[in-house]
Amino acid sequence: VQLQASGGGLVQAGGSLRLSCAAAGRTRYAMGWFRQAPGKDREFVAAISWTADSAKYADSVKGRFTISREVAKNTVFLQMNSLKPEDTAVYYCAADLRFDTLTVPLRIEYWGQGTLVTVSS
């Protein structure tokens, strides 16, 4: 599976951004987003099942971020609203056969390249 992420950029606090991740190859994978801030470990952000009927979020983004999926196009989106400076990080798209463990970086089978999100105060 090849993952191509896009949509990062610079935004002011309180603003919004939408990330996209297109998957090529096998399609029946749960997909999600992780992020890594400078000097910190990579952390889970959100995940969605391959059928798009289940989603889960890190507590830090609940109510502000929404993950969605266009099953036919095998593309996942992360709508990020009410952005805060602490959301600044490189965001990585991820795919794995198992949705239940798609919160653990070490368990991820496929990674996309990162896309930088910078939130200014």
Image: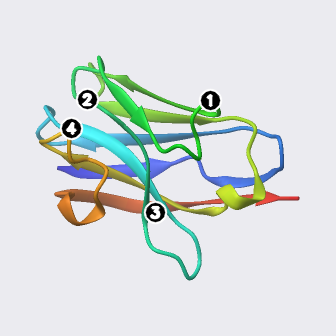
Identify the residue at horizontal 40%, vertical 42% (top origin): 21
Q: Amino acid at mark 3?
A: Gly
The residue singled out by tag 2 in the image is 49
Amino acid type of the residue tagged 2 in the rendering: Ser
State the colouring used for the structure image. Answer: rainbow
Residues at marks 4 and 1, CA–CA distance in whole angstroms:
21 Å
Residue at the disc numbered 4: 99
Instruction: Tell me the kind of residue under disc 1.
Output: Gly
Question: Tag 2 or tag 4, which sits nearer the N-term?
Answer: 2
Task: Check whether the beta carbons of the residues at disc 1 and disc 3 lie within 8 A of each other.
Answer: no
Q: Which comes before the other along the chain, label 4 or label 3?
A: 4
Tell me which numbered mark, 1 or 3, is placed earlier along the sequence: 1
Q: Nearer the viewer, mark 3 or mark 2?
A: 2
**Gap in angstroms between the C-alphas marked 1 and 3:** 23 Å
Kindly indicate whether the residue at mark 2 contacts the one at mark 1 (C-beta within 8 angstroms).
no
Mark 1 lies on residue: 63
Determine which quarter of the picture holds residue 51. top left
Question: Residue placed at 31% from the left, 23% from the top?
Answer: 54
Mark closer to the observer (1, 2): 1
Callout 3: 10 Å neighbours few (<14), some, many (20+)? Answer: some
